[in-house]
Amino acid sequence: MLRYAARRALAAVPLLAAISFLAFLLNQLAPIEPAVAVLHAQGVPQATEELIAAKRTELGLDRPLPIRYAEWLLSALKLDFGQSYVTGQPVLALLCPALLHTLQLAAVSFAVIVLLSIGLGVFCALREGTRLDQGTRAAAFFLTALPPYLLAAGLVWLLSVKLDLLPTSGLGGPASFVLPAAVLAAGYAGVYFRVIRSSMIAGRHDDSILYGRACGLPERTLTLRMLVQSLRLTVPIFAMAVPILLGSTVVVENVFAWPGLGTMSVKAILSRDYPVIQAFVLLLASAFVLFNAAADIVGAMLDPRLRKEL
Amino acid sequence: MKRLQRLLSDRLAAASLAVLAAILAAGALAPWIAPHPPDEVDMALRYAPWSLDYPLGNDQLGRCVLSRVLHGIRPSVLYVLAAVLASAGFGTAVGMAAGLLRGRTDALLMRLCDVMLSFPGYVMTLAVIGVLGTGLANILLAFILMKWAWFARVARTAVQRHADAGYVLFARTLGAGRLTLLRRHLLPACLPELAVLASGSFGTTLLQVSGLSFLGLGIQAPHAEWGMMLSEARQAMFSRPEQLLAPGFMIVLTVSAVNFLSDALQTALDPQAGGPRQAAAVPGEPEAAAAAMLRKEAV
């Protein structure tokens, strides 16, 4: 098991290297030269040849690519992502509060997703084929086809404007988490609950459950056992939901004016603030790779059959 | 053909297919069937309710909502479909090449896929838009760049599984060349899985593209696109919430039809499905389901 974990973790290293190189290249592939972009972002009306050349030297853009990559990577490892082209602040100063806010939102949504999908999954699996089961599944199906921003608009209109129960946007007290977390969780819970439901149903026809029932175990113990079985299969899928959530809060954050990574990245894109975009891509892609490795390792811990790989 | 019959015998699937065909046809014929030009401004008709002349009413600039919805089909659905097909085609070609040639080519292509797949969807899209600038074409390009790797992985796994099957070995013994093998045996064998993946990712791509347009990163005004229509309607949401209805309904209808079809495809093509395997796409990452599928197959 330890060997598997070590090998799986090692396999992530070249991926991380490739990702960092791609994130670095983003800057180089841009159709607008970085020096020009900086001048634009700082509001210089006319970018003359001399200004561009001076900016290029200032930013160190006149040196060869591999050297710049090595320097960029070394400082990125020290969490120094350079300075924002727009405000001149260090990127880290922008990134940290945004990451914190997004993490808070993602954590709340994740808890809602897990509770909802396990609750609904068990509820529906025990009532397989009844009206309640079909109704819940139809509602979940509808929710996954509903664009999150439309759901957000509808909820804001109903709960914040008509009933005046919750704030419409921004980060404030606990009440401000309700709507963004609900919108984020709605689509995902609709899918993950189906996973729990179908693996519960598959487990129900398992011989071990049949045997338990024949031995006279109470139904509640059997249900619990089925749940544990199906969680064993679904934990890796849930683990991957964390980085997916972090990366897909973009729309919800912008709708609710949430001061997180999504709002930050869209703002950076619209003003071509490349260092911020680079840091955002590097951070989330690394999180994705690390969580993927962690999900595989946890999956292998729970299910020894998966250890043969690698 | 048998598979198609099985698919159409599912009434819901047949209905979804009909709805999608109608939407696609309406999009292709939009300039001829729309009652008004989509960008004809008439401030006298600002927020006018529905009438015989303007069946769905008018928007904040007095433009015909029905015409805008019809013209919006092209960027919202047709172009997205084209992008999904392009990435499916490219990915399949790469995956089949990797599966057939094996060896070093295979290893190289699959490592490349791993790198592509380690970028979460939204982040990759935002990165590409960040570099190339906003616009629908760049969003679609980002999706093609990102999604081909999933198709490549699935195609490669399918080719490898079938390449050693008896009927393929038999054909090879008879002297069939690689291209004949591909065309006659391997492509048809991979098609079901690719179709399921393509339909699943079509649904999520529709939602994501409209979401990015909603944020103002996609198509620019005055062109009509559903996500952008919703974003415009949101500005007046508190006084005119009914403006959200038409484009919102169209998105939900299209995505539901695609999701139903994807579900039905999966059941029709794989009658023994039903294990702990995700049918519909995970919103945002339909491919997470494919990844789980692949992981299980590798065992």
Image (cartoon, helix red, strand yellow):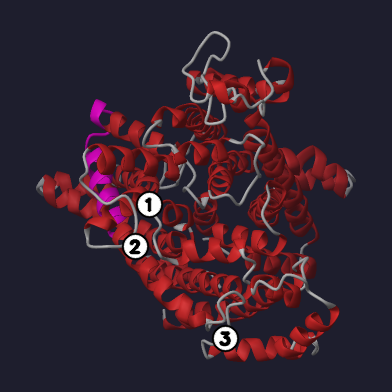
Q: Amino acid at mark 2?
A: Leu
Q: Quickly name the residue at label 2.
A: A105
Same subunit, labels 3 and 2: the answer reads: yes
Q: Quadrant of the C terminus of chain A?
A: bottom right
Question: How far from the left and from the top, in percent, is residue B9?
Answer: 53, 18
The chain holding disc 3 is A
Q: Is residue A20 magenta?
A: no
Q: Secondary structure at mark 3?
A: helix
Same subunit, labels 2 and 1: the answer reads: yes
Q: Secondary structure at mark 2?
A: helix
Q: How many marks?
A: 3
Give me the residue at 51% from left, 61% from top: B299
Q: Quadrant of the N terminus of chain A?
A: bottom left
Q: CA distance from mark 3 to mark 1?
A: 30 Å
Q: Are marks 2 and 1 in contact (CB under 8 Å)?
A: yes
Question: How far from the left and from the top, in percent, is residue A281?
Answer: 57, 70
The chain holding disc 1 is A
Question: How far from the left and from the top, in percent, is residue A282?
Answer: 57, 74
Q: Are marks 3 and 2 in contact (CB under 8 Å)?
A: no
Q: Secondary structure at mark 1?
A: helix
> Label 3 neighbourhood size at 10 Å, few (<14), some (14-19), many (20+)?
some
Q: CA distance from mark 2 to mark 1?
A: 9 Å
Residue range (magenta): A111-132
Q: Quickly name the residue at label 1.
A: A184
In the rendered image, the vertical position of residue B65 relative to residue A102, given as above or below: above
Q: Amino acid at mark 1?
A: Leu
Q: Which mark is residue A123?
A: none
Q: Are marks 3 and 1 in contact (CB under 8 Å)?
A: no
Residue nearest the viewer, comparing A139 with A125: A139
